[in-house]
Amino acid sequence: MIELSGVSKEYRNGRRIVRALDGIDLEIPEGHFAAIKGPSGCGKSTLLMIVGAMLQPTAGKVLVCGRKLATLSGPERALLRADQIGFVFQMFHLVPYLTVFENVILAGGGRGRRPERGAVDGILARFGLSDRSTHLPGELSAGERQRVALARALVLHPPVVLADEPTGNLDPGNAAEVVRILADYRDDGGTVMMVTHSPVADEVADKVVHLGGSALVSG
Ligand code: ADP
């Protein structure tokens, strides 16, 4: 489902080169939950952005949902992101002037599929957010905001979910709830890749991936 071989990423700022990833091999089978761990700056977000077809590696091969990312055009990548991948971020990334319901129904970002209204009501109910449907994100607690972001990421049932420290801004109770929602999604057949420092994620993960120390800097 997700396969990386020899993936490296170098960032260049003028003459300075930062080697964020160095020859990563990784396989996450369909229906598995991988927790990605490691110190700040070791390339976790870079890895997630590469798998999410938001960033091209400097070297190596990436296969997501049977597609070789290097062979896809820009619009094909955008469609893959919209149709096949759900994203969740530490800072939620909800649209502040849209209601909870509107944030979720706009999953897919105008590309690809659109969720049915009934599916949006259903997932909001499942995540305990029915009475928040007409609220703006600014009126919600951090835990509620992350559950809205999860509803938006999962409502179209994407085969792959990529979560970048989704528990980073939450108290332990809400963090455990986020991990439980993602583990349930895996139990229903989804493939989950989660960057996290949370020990709760280790308990549910099929695989814990430790990325090495800080990125190499030269130049
Ligand atoms: P993590 O998520 O583990 O904290 P990142 O993937 O964000 O690590 O970053 C890995 C390394 O790459 C860090 O040294 C970071 O400073 C560097 N980096 C990330 N993005 C860029 C960029 N756009 N330009 C230059 N360096 C970057």
Image: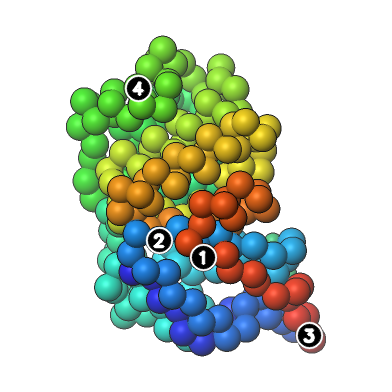
Residue 175 in the figure: left or right of residue 67: right
Between disc 1 and disc 4, the foreground one is 1
Residue 99 in the figure: left or right of residue 119: right
Residue 63 in the figure: left or right of residue 5: left
Q: Mark 2 highlights which residue?
A: 32
- The kind of residue tagged 2 is His
- Graded by Cα atoms within 10 Å as few (under 14), some (14 to 19) or many (20 or more), the crowding at tag 4 reads some
Q: Mark 1 highlights which residue?
A: 207
Between disc 2 and disc 3, the foreground one is 2
Q: Is residue 151 above or below residue 73?
A: above
Please state which of residues 47 and 219 is positioned toward the viewer in this rendering. Answer: 47
In the rendered image, the quadrant that contains the C terminus is bottom right
Q: Is label 3 in a helix, a strand or a loop?
A: strand
Q: Is label 1 in a helix, a strand or a loop?
A: strand
Cα gap from disc 3 to disc 1, whole angstroms:
32 Å
Q: Position of residue 133 (x, y in %)?
A: 39, 18
Q: Is mark 2 within 8 Å of ligand 1?
A: no
Q: Mark 4 highlights which residue?
A: 125
Q: Mark 3 highlights which residue?
A: 218
Please state which of residues 105 and 185 is positioned toward the viewer in this rendering. Answer: 185
- The kind of residue tagged 4 is Ala
Q: Residue at the location (33% across, 30% down)?
A: 123
Cα gap from disc 4 to disc 3, whole angstroms:
51 Å
